[in-house]
Image: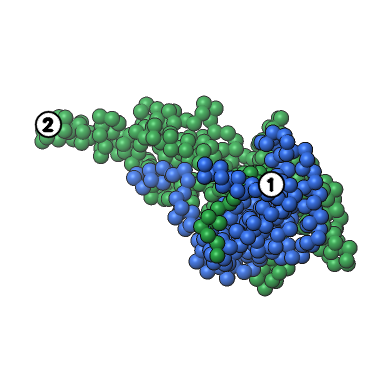
Chain colours: A blue, B green
């Protein structure tokens, strides 16, 4: 009876170690060619990988294609996953590589700059309005995404992971395959470039940084 | 070299990053693409035919549609089943004492084993009769030895008679213990293999609570138990999940979990035949697809897809059903099938596969 009650009294959510064990089991079976195990892994990780790629690309239509490519490459390369890190992290690392290829295939620096100018030129509506208006928030998002498109991929991905996704530096660095120190340098450079662009386009005042600092010190 | 201060996002950029993250979250939530495992696997085969066999792709196409898990983050099975397990836990906590008396439904057993259970119950009955006849003598003898109160307690069996009846105890032991010893019949098995089978989701009704109504074939062995006395019935009545009893869906799912696929299919077909069962019927089809595949293979599943599309040409499964039929259609008619798919579902989850198939067909290659 005791064992029965133990089975009847489940926790509503599995513990972290239970989830890991379960995933390890699925991975083991997937390595053995179990399609259903793969289907389960695919289903469980799809949303997160999709979101990750959408953040990197800013384009959900592209992300829809790239997420499939990510899983397809993960499928054929599963033997390379040694289990030292998490499976989710490994998938995200593959996604980053695929996004880089995507950027290389479509990046045209002049077009990105043109787009940035167009997006930014529409800003006049917002700056004098309620600073928290939905319109202004939407405009800020569009401008920042347009600025991101003009950045070199290595700066862009550093900024997205550190500042948009708020990932811890060590995890983000591992995902990008660089050292934490290197990531910090890239993120800092990305911020400087973004700030510089926003100042040039009139979205930030030249001395905004100093003002913020003065504010913070006061 | 970056300083520690450089690690932080400059405050003047914070509104931009916040708004961009919000914007991207909205885009992601709006997009919510439907995962297409079969298409992904076909792509993997393109990348490395040695790593993915054609058979694997075919099997993936036969899998039930892969739908997103809960919105937002992916969620595990246990979380998805939380309402069920939570309800069950609450019931267990509240009625634990009564449950100890209740007959727990026998697991899925072979006919031979059912006969064995019936014989066991019959033997228990015989023992009860014997006890009724010989019991007073025994009690008297034990009373002589240990005193009346102690003797009455002993005649009640292994459990306290003050709370339960003696004969009831006999049957609780006779039924419950084998159940506990057969964990494979637990309705919430969590082995990954079971999770991956096309088994239905667990019913929201606590399965063990109303076993008699769930499986008429199990009634015979239990009837003698129910005749043991009023105490025997009361807990069962208390534990009934709802006055109306289990739904057809619950019954079908239970049958499916027991491996009685044909019976489960008949239950789902009963739902289809209900007057005005629009949404219920449609959901029943969702289970019938997988059941038909288990019973009759890919052709059987395709037949149910066609039946479904006749009844629900724009239903929630129409996208997957049409795509599944196209994948199974003969090469000569496949392009036309995908064309038809695109006309019905221009933004469908399988449109890329459809477009690729049509492009292949246009290039003289059968998709």
Tell me the number on the disc at residue A28: none
In screen coordinates, is A13 left or right of B72? left
User: Numbered disc 1: what chain?
Assistant: A
In screen coordinates, is B207 left or right of A142? left
Quadrant containing the N terminus of chain B is bottom right
- Residue under disc 1 on the same chain as residue under disc 2: no
In screen coordinates, is A194 left or right of A1? right
Residue corresponding to mark 1: A204
**Helix, strand or loop at disc 1?**
loop
Quadrant containing the C terminus of chain B is bottom right
Position of residue B225 relative to residue A65, above or below, is: above
| Image quarter of residue A178 | bottom right
Callout count? 2
User: Numbered disc 2: what chain?
Assistant: B
| Image quarter of residue B332 | bottom right
Residue at image position (78%, 56%) is A113
Give the camera-side residue of B359 and B293: B359
**Helix, strand or loop at disc 2?**
loop
Give the camera-side residue of A118 and A55: A118
Give the camera-side residue of B74 and B13: B13
Residue at image position (54%, 49%) is B76
Would residue B288 be seen by someone viewing this image from the given angle? no
Residue B336 image point, x, y percent? 86, 55
How many neighbours does mark 1 have within 10 angstroms: few (below 14), some (14-19), or many (20 or more)? some
Residue at image position (55%, 27%) is B244
Tell me the number on the disc at residue B147: 2
Q: CA distance from mark 1 to mark 2?
A: 95 Å
How many neighbours does mark 2 have within 10 angstroms: few (below 14), some (14-19), or many (20 or more)? few
């Amino acid at each position: 009876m005791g064992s029965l009650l133990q089975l009847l009294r489940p926790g509503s959510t599995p513990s972290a170690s239970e989830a890991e064990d379960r995933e390890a089991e699925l991975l083991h079976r997937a390595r053995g060619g179990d399609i259903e195990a793969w289907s389960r892994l695919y289903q469980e990780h799809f949303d997160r990988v999709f979101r990750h790629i959408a953040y990197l690309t800013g384009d959900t239509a592209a992300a829809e294609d790239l997420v499939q490519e990510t899983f397809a490459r993960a499928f054929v390369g599963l033997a390379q996953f040694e289990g030292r890190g998490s499976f989710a992290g490994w998938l995200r690392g593959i996604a980053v590589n695929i996004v880089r290829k995507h950027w290389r295939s479509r990046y045209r620096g002049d077009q990105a700059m043109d787009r940035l100018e167009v997006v930014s030129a529409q800003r006049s509506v917002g700056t004098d309005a309620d600073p928290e208006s939905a319109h202004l928030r939407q405009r800020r998002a569009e401008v920042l995404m347009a600025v991101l498109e003009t950045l070199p991929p290595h700066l862009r991905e550093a900024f997205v992971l550190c500042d948009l996704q708020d990932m811890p530096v060590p995890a983000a660095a591992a995902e990008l395959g660089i050292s934490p120190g290197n990531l910090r340098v890239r993120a800092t450079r990305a911020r400087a470039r973004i700030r510089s662009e926003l100042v040039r386009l009139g979205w930030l005042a030249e001395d905004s940084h100093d003002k913020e600092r003065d504010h913070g010190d006061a | 070299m970056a300083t520690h201060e450089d690690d932080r996002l400059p405050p003047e950029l914070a509104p931009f990053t916040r708004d961009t993250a919000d914007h991207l979250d909205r885009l992601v939530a709006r997009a919510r693409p439907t995962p297409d495992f079969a298409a992904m696997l076909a792509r993997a085969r393109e990348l490395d035919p040695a790593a993915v066999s054609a058979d694997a792709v075919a099997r993936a196409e036969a899998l039930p549609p892969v739908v997103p898990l809960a919105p937002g983050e992916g969620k595990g099975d246990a979380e998805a089943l939380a309402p069920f397990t939570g309800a069950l836990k609450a019931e267990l906590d509240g009625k634990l004492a009564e449950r100890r008396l209740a007959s727990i439904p026998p697991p899925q057993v072979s006919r031979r084993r059912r006969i064995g259970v019936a014989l066991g119950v019959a033997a228990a009955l015989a023992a009860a009769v014997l006890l009724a006849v010989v019991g007073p003598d025994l009690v008297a003898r034990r009373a002589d030895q240990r005193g009346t109160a102690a003797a009455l307690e002993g005649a009640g069996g292994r459990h306290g008679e003050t709370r339960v009846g003696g004969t009831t105890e006999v049957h609780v032991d006779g039924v419950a213990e084998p159940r506990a010893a057969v964990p494979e019949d637990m309705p919430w098995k969590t082995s990954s293999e079971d999770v991956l089978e096309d088994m239905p989701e667990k019913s929201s009704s606590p399965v063990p609570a109303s076993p008699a109504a769930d499986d008429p074939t199990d009634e015979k062995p239990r009837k003698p138990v129910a005749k043991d006395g009023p105490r025997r019935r009361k807990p069962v009545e208390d534990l009934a999940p709802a006055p109306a009893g289990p739904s057809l869906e619950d019954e079908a799912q239970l049958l499916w979990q027991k491996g009685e696929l044909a019976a489960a299919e008949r239950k789902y077909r009963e739902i289809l035949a209900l007057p005005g069962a629009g949404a219920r019927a449609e959901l029943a089809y969702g289970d019938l697809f997988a059941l038909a595949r288990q019973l009759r293979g890919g052709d059987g599943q395709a037949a149910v897809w066609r039946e479904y599309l006749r009844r629900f040409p724009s239903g929630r499964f129409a996208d997957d059903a049409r795509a599944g039929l196209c994948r199974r259609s003969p090469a000569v008619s496949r392009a036309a099938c995908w064309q038809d798919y695109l006309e019905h579902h221009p933004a469908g989850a399988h449109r890329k596969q459809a477009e690729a198939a049509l492009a292949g067909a246009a290039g003289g290659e059968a998709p």
